[in-house]
Image (tube, helix red, strand yellow):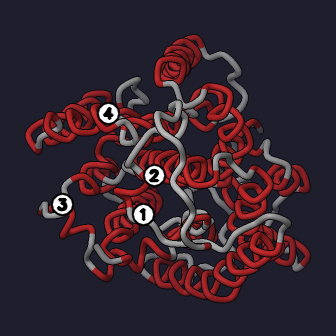
Amino acid sequence: MTSQERIGALDGWRGVAILLVLADHAGETSNSSAIHAATRVGATGVGIFFALSGFLITSLLLAEKRKLGRIRLGDFYRRRFFRIVPPVLVFLAALLLLRRLGLVPVTNLQVLSSIFLFRNYLHSDWGAGWYTGHLWSLTVEEHFYLFWPLLLIATRARLRPLVALALSVAAWRAVSLHYHFLAGPWAPGRTDIRIDSLLWGCIVAIVLTRPGLRDRFKRGFTVWILLFLILVDIGSNIGHRQHNYSFYEPVILALLVVWPVLHPKSVLRRLLDAPLLKFVGTISYSLYIWQEMWLLFPRTPVLFPRMQAFPVNIVMAFCCAIASYYLVEKPFIGLGRRLTARAPGAAAPSAPSFHQIAAADPFAPALSPAPEVKSLRTLQSPSPKLLGEDI
């Protein structure tokens, strides 16, 4: 299996996720009620992003634990910082420049909350607050990155406490949304009721490290079960005439994300490996950040009437995303890797396969002495590129 084959399905999922977000936001201003109703798929796209993050990060942390005997928290947080923060800071700097020119009414609180990770707990405002409103999801992910490695170590990747935690979050979401607890912020964006979307991706990644569970999982998780789960989720959302933040959707999306990884010869895998979709997935992080500048909510102040109108707004979003990826995102990812490689005791990354990552439970007690190290490569930590995650 080549490196490109390993990462294709997951880059493809990123492409699917961001296209769902774009469809949702582009449909906000449609004059057709049918088009508007059919494009309420952005929340599903974000859910796919969350499931991917949980699955990828956990796979890489478990691989590092197995190879090195421990998880290097400093390296993890360093790579995450350079992966996530620079593109957001550039976007926020652009908003502040536009505010200086009197074009956008972004507030200091909106900017500071985006930097200090509480944007998803501000009062919801899809008018003037639209330009930073999408950063709620990045805040959820950053909260996850802060606590998940510590929780993974504390629980020793045991499934029972993690499943219990995910189910508890789902129960709290149902109660909170029903009784309108913490009603000020946009409720579906709060970390305390959305973190299970990432946890189920983590749980699936752990299952794949247990050979017995992995084999039964692969045999039992047939294409018919996959189609049934997809229909259940779609039917639930249609039945509620809006996105239904059900307890089972995070589970379904986590299973959906991993299915083509387990079935590399499937039709779904071939579709996800389409070069154009993989490219969209590659720039999806920058595209998610910058699309908010061009695809507007109906009450949002318009800065550039022609460029923020469909379909020019789609073109502008892609142009900004491509520029952000090549001029900001990619260089800073490289910088983070170089700084990690120079850190005391750090090793240069190698590129194990997905099957090597899922070969054994790294937290299980050793049943035999560790093999003799034959070369420096056997000490190297797993490459972020192995599953398409630049960390």
Earlier sequence position, callout 3 versus callout 1: 1
Establish if 326 lies above or below 4.
below
| Residue 387 occupies quadrant | bottom left
CA separation, marks 2 and 4? 26 Å
Q: Which residue is depicted at the point 14% across and 64% down?
A: 265
**Label 4 vs label 1, nearer the camera:** 1
Residue 335 placed where, x, y %?
76, 79
**Label 2 vs label 1, nearer the camera:** 2
CA separation, marks 2 and 1? 8 Å
The residue where tag 4 is placed is 241
The residue where tag 2 is placed is 52
Closer to the camera, 280 or 75? 75
The residue where tag 3 is placed is 268
Earlier sequence position, callout 2 versus callout 3: 2
How busy is the neighbourhood of tag 3: few (under 14 within 10 Å), some, or many (20 plus)? some
The residue where tag 1 is placed is 14
Q: Label 1 is placed on what type of residue? A: Arg
Closer to the camera, 337 or 234? 337
CA separation, marks 4 and 1? 26 Å
Q: Label 4 is placed on what type of residue? A: Arg
User: CB of mark 2 within 8 Å of CB of mark 1?
Assistant: yes
**Label 3 vs label 4, nearer the camera:** 3
Q: Which label number is shown at residue 355?
A: none
Closer to the camera, 359 or 113? 359
Quadrant placement of the C terminus: bottom right
How busy is the neighbourhood of tag 2: few (under 14 within 10 Å), some, or many (20 plus)? many
Q: What kind of element bears circle 3?
A: helix
How busy is the neighbourhood of tag 1: few (under 14 within 10 Å), some, or many (20 plus)? many
Q: Residue furthest left?
A: 224
Residue 294 seen in the current view: no
CA separation, marks 3 and 1? 14 Å
